[in-house]
Image (cartoon, rainbow, N blue to C red):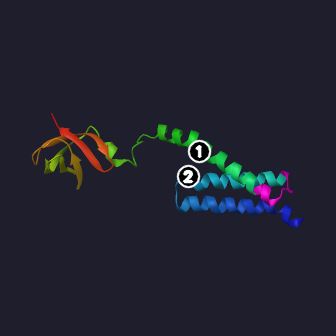
Amino acid sequence: MLASLTMHYGWWLLALVLIGAEIMAPGFFMLWIGIAAAALGVVLLFVPAMSFGMQAVVFSVFALISCFVYWRFVRHAMDERSDRPNLNRRAEQYIGRRFVLETAIVNGQGKARVGDSLWLAEGPDLPTGAAIEVVGVDGSTLKVKAAG
């Protein structure tokens, strides 16, 4: 009887561990599962006799719902309010910008100087030192054309 009355503390402890893990390795995933564990702890305050099997089912449902809410609503809202939505997609930030070829583009491939680093560049054959404009990206390869 005592174990069923204090079971909500176990779920709250799990919630704290998951949220703490989220702080250590951010990615927003464990946060939402931690919220599900905390919610189950609240439910157990009102239904203390719930079996552990039923708790596992309810926790799974809460976790799926909370993750769905994150993926459907929160993630998109965070992307829309960002003043730099391509922050983690560095190559996409270069679309429309102009750079100089470090090595000539021969047979469609060369290298462009971007700041203090070299990036693979694909486009029409151009000589070393030519001005280029980034028109797209493919992974870490810049798709370029002659700047005009």
Q: How many numbered discs sit on the rendered protein?
A: 2
Q: Which of 26 and 103 lies nearest the eye of the viewer?
A: 103
The answer to whether the residues at label 2 and label 1 have Cβ atoms under 8 Å apart is yes
Is residue 86 in the magenta section?
A: no
How packed mark 2 is, by other alpha carbons closer than 10 Å (few <14, some 14-19, many 20 or more), is some
| Residue that mark 2 sits on | 28
The quarter of the image holding the N terminus is bottom right
Precedes in sequence: disc 2 or disc 1: 2
Three-letter code for the amino acid on which mark 1 is drawn: Tyr
| Residue at position x 55%, y 52% in the image | 28
> How many angstroms separate mark 2 from mark 1 (CA)?
8 Å
| Residue that mark 1 sits on | 70
Q: Is residue 3 left or right of residue 24?
A: right
| Residue at position x 26%, y 46% in the image | 142
Three-letter code for the amino acid on which mark 2 is drawn: Phe
Q: Is residue 71 left or right of residue 63?
A: left
Question: Residue 75 appears at what percent x and percent y?
Answer: 53, 43
| Residue at position x 31%, y 51% in the image | 140
Question: Residue 87 appears at what percent x and percent y?
Answer: 39, 47
SS label for mark 1: helix
Is residue 53 in the magenta section?
A: yes
Q: Is residue 38 above or below residue 10?
A: above
SS label for mark 2: loop
Q: Is residue 3 above or below residue 93?
A: below
Q: Which of 49 and 98 lies nearest the eye of the viewer?
A: 49
Task: Examine the rendering and report whether any part of residue 76 can be seen.
Answer: yes
**Numbered range of the magenta stretch:** 46-55
